[in-house]
Image (cartoon, grey):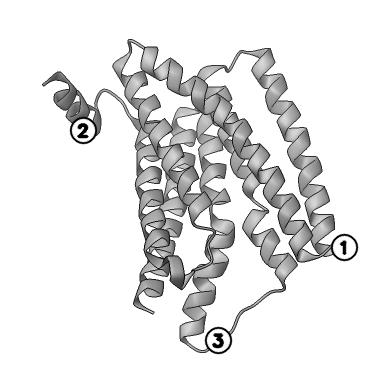
Amino acid sequence: MVFEIIYHTLGFLIMALMIGLSIKFYINYKYTGQKELIGGVLMGLSFLGGLVYFSFQFLLGLFGIEVSVDDKTLIFINFGLIPLLVMSWLYVFYQLLYPDSKKVLAFLIIMLIISIIWEISFIYMVFFSTLTAEVIGDIAFIFDAFSMLVSLIPLAILAIKSIRSKDKVLKYRGIMLIIGFLLAGVSLVVDEGIFDPNNAIIEIIARIALIFGLFLALYGFFLTEESKLYKFISGISSE
């Protein structure tokens, strides 16, 4: 029970962090007009689907209030926002590195069309088809694995450009975004949102890693020469 409380407490902390992150991205977008920040807002919100449901289900359960949905709906809660997460990241990548590239824009549009077709199909499978929850879950896993693999391509490009860059701010921003996204990605794979007492320690560590990854991604977006973190990193690297 103690591990489960810690697990869901971290879940509420992640929710607060993502909502705060989305608000900060939006406020900065209003002031700066940087379009990649809109992608940041959507990325933050796309984390909330299953996290909100399972965390509040646990909280309400402590007061004797039972909240449950059928298996198909549970699959939709878990996987329904993954396309939004992937598309938000691809949009951020496009705006950060290739805002004038027609080829990257074409790739973005193709992925958007694929994601829309998938989401419509997914909604149909979950709420209108006679497919079993197990079959739908397998199909959803395959599509999301494909989406995540596609997302690794721009992440690899960002890594190469960051490492090769002579601009220290760009280099540190890129490295922080890479580490942050990798930590978040691995954490989401390990932790499916459903607490498993047999893997309690691993799932708690995954959530802590997710918080750390989100912190790095946040500062990766907003790192400047004036920021204290940049000065701290520069001081360490110059020693």
Residue 54 quadrant: bottom right
- What residue is pinned by disc 2? 228
Going 75% across and 28% down the picture, which residue do you hit? 110
- What residue is pinned by disc 1? 128
Instruction: Answer left or right for 48 relative to 121.
Output: left
Dot 3 or dot 2, earlier in sequence: 3
Q: Position of residue 212 (x, y in %)?
A: 34, 47
Going 56% across and 16% down the picture, which residue do you hit? 98
Q: Residue furthest front?
A: 198
Q: Nearer the viewer, residue 125 or 84?
A: 125
Q: Secondary structure at mark 1?
A: loop
Dot 2 or dot 1, earlier in sequence: 1
User: Compared with residue 225, is residue 186 higher up or lower down, i.e. above or below?
Assistant: below
Residue 52 quadrant: bottom right
Dot 1 or dot 3, earlier in sequence: 3
User: What amino acid type should be assigned to the residue bearing mark 3?
Assistant: Ile
Q: Residues within 10 Å of mark 1 (few under 14, many from 20)?
A: few
Label 2, label 1: how many angstroms apart (C-alpha)? 53 Å
Label 1, label 3: how many angstroms apart (C-alpha)? 29 Å
- What residue is pinned by disc 3? 65
Q: Residues within 10 Å of mark 3 (few under 14, many from 20)?
A: few
User: What amino acid type should be assigned to the residue bearing mark 1?
Assistant: Phe
User: What amino acid type should be assigned to the residue bearing mark 2?
Assistant: Lys
Q: Nearer the viewer, residue 35 or 219?
A: 219
